[in-house]
Image: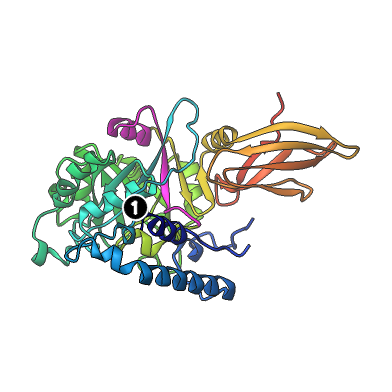
Amino acid sequence: MKFLSIFILALSMVSFSPSTGSFSSNTSVVKMPEVLNVKSRRTMALTKNFQIMKSKVISTVMLFAGLNVFGQDLNNVQMYEVFREESRKIIHLPDIIGYKTLKCDFHMHTIFSDGAVWPTVRVDEAWQEGLDVIAITDHIENHPSKSFVGGDDNSSYDIAKPYAEKNDIILIKGAEITRDMPPGHFNALFLENSNELDTKDYMDAFVAAKKQGAFIIWNHPGWKAQQPDTCKWWDIHTELFQKGMLHAVEVFNEREFYPITLDWCNDKKIVYTAASDIHGTIASTYNLDEFNRPMTLVFAKERTEESVREALFSGRTVAWFGKYFAGSEELLAAIFKASVVADFAEETKKSKIYKVKNLSDVAFYLVSADGTQFEIPAYSETRVNIPKNHDLNFEITNLMITATKNLNIMFPATK
C-alpha cells in the first residue's frame, strides 16, 4: 500500500511541457492589455493526450488500491493534495545606493468602497506576490456596499492591520479623495483619521489630509472616464502642488500608461508611482505567469513605515509596470548597475565577448546609435558579442525618464 501511495504521488507531480518594443506617438494614454490575465485558446494535442494518459493510469491504480485506501477510515479521509500549498513569491530586485528596495502598491479597494473583497484578502495577495508594503485606499465618497457592511472610512484599515502585522506586510493607512475632474481622484497616505476627509468641498478634504501629514498622489490622470481626449495638467493641480497638497502622480494605473506624466515628474520633480487600483482579485486580473502587478519601488533606509514615508517625501521611487521602469536617471542607472554584471570572456578578430549576468527579474533591452541591439534576459546569464571599436554607449529602451527619453549608459562599464 505504501508503494502505491508513493507511486500515485510521484505520478501526480509529473507535468508535460512541449518543448523591444516602442510606444506610439500618443503620449496621453497607452493601453497595455498584455499585463492582464487572458484565457488562452491554444491547445497542444500532445499535452492533452499526456494528461489523459496520466489520468487513466492514476484512476486504474486507485481502483485497485481503493479498498485498502478507503478501508482505513470509512468516515473521513483527508485529501490534502487538492489544496494549494501556501508560498510567497520572491521578487529579485537589488538594493541600491545604500537603500532597501521595497515593493509597494499604494492603490487598492475592498468591500468598504467599491471593491469585491474583504480587507484581509489584500494582505494575502500582497504576501503571496512578494510585496512589502500596501495601502488600502477605499473611496471616501463612494460606498455602494455600506448598507450591507456598515463601518466607516477607517474600517478597512482597522480590519486589515492586525493581519498585516501577522504576515509581515507594512500596511499604510490611506483613502481616496474621489471627485470630478478637475481635480480628479487622489490617494492620501499616512492618514490618522480618514473620516476627516469626508467634506463637501474638495479643497477642505485636501487641507484635512495635509494637516495629518499625508503624502498625496494624483491617481490615473489620463483615465478616459474623466479626461476622454487628453491627459491635462490643470490650473488647480498647479495650486495643489504649490500648496504642498500634490506630491506624486500615477504614471501607470491598472493597465494604462500615461507617457506625458513622465515629463511632469521630471520637470516638476514630483514622484513617479505605479499602482494596481485593484477592485476584484489580483489573480483574475493580471497575467501573473509573465508579469507582476504594477507597483512602486521605494528605496528606503529600513523596512519600516516611517522609512517608507521618508523615502516617498524624498522622491526615491521608481514605477514598475510590465517590462518597464520609469524614474529619475540616477535611480534607473543604479538599478541597472546593481542588476547587471559583465565579465570579459574572450576576444575574436572582430569582437569582444562578455559573460553577462542579470540578477533581477527584469529583462533589459539595449540599442546603440548604429542600431546594434540585444537583450539581457531576466534573472539569467547570457553571452554578449560587441564588435571591436564599437561605441559602448547604449540606450536602455525599457528604462524611461521622460515620454521621449530613455536611460543611456556605458556598457560594459569601463573601469
Camera sees residue 28: yes
Rendered image quadrant of residue 223: bottom left
The number of discs equals: 1
The amino acid pointed to by label 1 is: Glu
Which quadrant of the rendered structure holds the N terminus?
A: bottom left
Q: Is residue 360 left or right of residue 255?
A: right
Q: In the rendered structure, does residue 9 fall within the stretch colored magenta?
A: no
Q: How is the image coloured?
A: rainbow
- Residue at 42 percent across and 68 percent down: it is 58
Label 1 secondary element: loop
Q: Is residue 311 magenta?
A: yes
Residue 302's x, y, as percent? 35, 28
- Tell me which segment is drawn in magenta: 290-313
Q: Which residue is mark 1?
A: 85
Residue 150 coordinates in the image, percent (x, y): 8, 60
Q: Residues within 10 Å of mark 1 (few under 14, many from 20)?
A: few
* Residue 72, quarter of picture: bottom left
* Above-or-below relation of 266 to 11: above
What residue is at 37 percent from the left and 70 percent from the top? 64
At 81% from the left edge and 33% from the top edge, which residue is drawn? Answer: 346
